[in-house]
Amino acid sequence: MTRIRNVVLEFLRHGPPHNQLLSPLTQYLALCGNHSGVTVRVPYEHAQFLARHQSLNYELESGEGDVARQPTRQHTELQLQITAAEMAGILAEIPGLISELTDWRDDDTFTHLEIVLSASELALLPFELANAPNGFPGAGQPLALQSQNPLCVTRRVRRVNNDRFRWPDRPRVLFAHALPPADAARLVPAHLLALRNAVAPWVGLKPGERWEPDRPPSYLREYLTVLPQASVQSIFAELRKDRYTHVHLLAHGVEIREGVDRRFGLALSDSERPLSEDRVSASRLAMLFRAMVRDCHPRLALPAVVTLASCQGAAGGSVVGAGSSVAHALHEAGIPLVVASQFPLSFPASVLMVQTLYDQLLWGCDPRVLLCDLRRQLKMRLPRTHDWASLVAYASLPADLETQGQKVRFEQAKRAIEAAFSLWDADAETQLGTVSPAPGAANADWRDETRDRLGSGKARLERLDAEFRNMKRGTSSVTAEDHASVLGRLASTEKRQAEIEFQRRTESDSQRERWRETLRSACTYYHRAFCVDRSQTWALAQEVALTLALDGSSAALPDKPMCKYHALACQLLELDRRNEDRLRRLWALGNLIELELVSLWLVEPSGEGSLAEASAEVQQRIERLVKEFQAAVGRDDWELVSHRRQLIRYSEWLYRKPEEGETAHTTPTERQAWDGRVRGEIRSLCESLFRRSGGLDP
């Protein structure tokens, strides 16, 4: 697993953050790690820097066609090289930074360089453009692009601290756009498609809903809201009523002049004058994104991520008045991650930004790694632009982000798998005729998409399993219970997939027995879950129940481990049955009911009488367990749904009555005949359980 090392570089000076011009005479104190502070100066006069900065805006003068723009590109490339060398000169004056960046232990180390700024004039400097000075990893190359020690550069305002922030594990995205009609027709569809694709893994179908390729499912609204012609009032209304975790704003950047002060803001729609634009300053946007939420408990809206697809969303303008860039102001208001651009951002770059960030951010991937990847892709895929240097990220992330990210990835993989299974359920309803198929919806396309989404969710769980296995105990806050939960979810996914493969077994004779292999894979995951955390008795109980269902009496022989596992699971579950935690008691009772059902496999095959007597005793014990379960469970408890689903699997799948033509034409052996009788008794007990207790309903 890649280790992320955080290197903090902070610049300080006396006085307020604003009303100070860039000057070689101004001294700044640079602090890095536990090294001594050093004095740093910038090599610019303010007017000189602004003139150079202007040349990085792609075009020095208006013109039509490539003829007018060609000189500008040459001039821009030269200015990029000069500015990169000058930024490298500033960083080279800080010996502590050289020491920190060269102190990596292995090839798996990833460095996060966090530049802490409070002085407004320093926020004008394009640190992201800097070359690596001599002594730095990849000396002479762009520091943020060199491959010797992969590195992500972010900025932070020292007053912002989000150490206690909880990274959202259920994303909800607000896409607000405010563009003239011609620009909206060209830009909005690409951004919307990227966001639709990003949230697609979690968009399932509701019961009774049919899948239509050209129509978004109703669940899409729970993950993505689109706000066209966005105004301050409409964005405010959305942020007040819903808890949005990610906000993507697509609008033009505009210059706002207030006396001698010049700032960049965003052009939003004017709700009072539809044909006019509302030039919204950075301070107004900061108040907008921290709107008071209408809730029982007074709180301010706090999206985890805000992305600005606009020109110069991170440009600071002048530093005369108190203020800052849009990105700086949003971050200073407390938003953990703000991604914007300090120079005009090209259209392809804005789309690539949405695709790269949102496609993985919503899964819980580390934003620092994604920002590094995005910057490298911008350089590789858009070589005729300097969008890679334009990208600016203001970040104040929780100290335990890596651990939180693992838990988010687990929750998101679970939801993706459930969404995929909802498509299978809808397919089954269509096959049964309870839901009519959508016009033009091909079953093959539908099932291919379902398999792809299910495979994606399982692959992410498997990567989490690999991460946990490679971790040393005690070096991470991830517990054995966390690892067991991942393995248990993989096991339950395999079990449900085996059930689906069983239902589809007539599609191909070569795949008729695939469901057995999948179910054995589930048994393996359950076994590993119990070995990782011995307190997870449910995993052992499920391994025993499924193994006996697959192998019958041959797995219940005295010299086989299942007999001992069955006894051990029953003893441990009896302890959980008396636990103070109600939910733990419910799980124990449900698993004990299953173990009582499969205990018939442990009966010695000595005759019909012994099996009938054992079945009667089992039924009495099950009735006592069911009464206890009904007294403790609530109608809205997930445990009720889970155990009912398991009993249905027993009666309709694992112990179903053989259909005509499935029985062997040859005379069964004595053991096969005995197994048939045991399966019949277990099926009868399940049917009796549903008749007499409503299937565990309270």
Image (tube, rainbow, N blue to C red):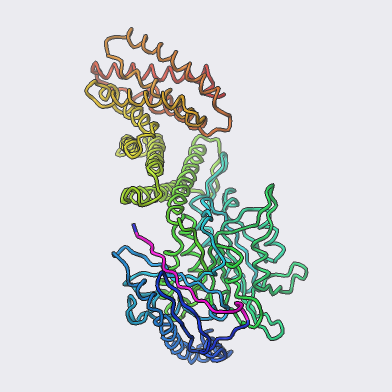
The spot of residue 563 in percent (x, y) is 28, 23
Give the residues drawn in magenta, as a range.
Answer: 2-18
Residue at horizontal 28%, vertical 24%?
A: 564
Question: On the picture, is 205 further left or further right than 297?
Answer: left
Question: On the picture, is 147 further left or further right than 689?
Answer: left
Residue at horizontal 35%, vertical 80%?
A: 141
- Residue 632 in the magenta stretch? The answer is no
| Residue at the front extreme, as displayed | 36
- Residue 9 in the magenta stretch? The answer is yes
Q: Quick check: 254 above or below 192?
A: below
Q: Quick check: 228 above or below 564?
A: below
| Residue 512 appears in the figure | no
| Residue at the top extreme, as displayed | 609
Quadrant of the snapshot with the C terminus = top right
* 48 and 450: which is toward the camera: 48
The spot of residue 154 in percent (x, y) is 47, 70
Residue 244, quarter of the rendered image: bottom right
Residue at horizontal 57%, vertical 29%?
A: 634
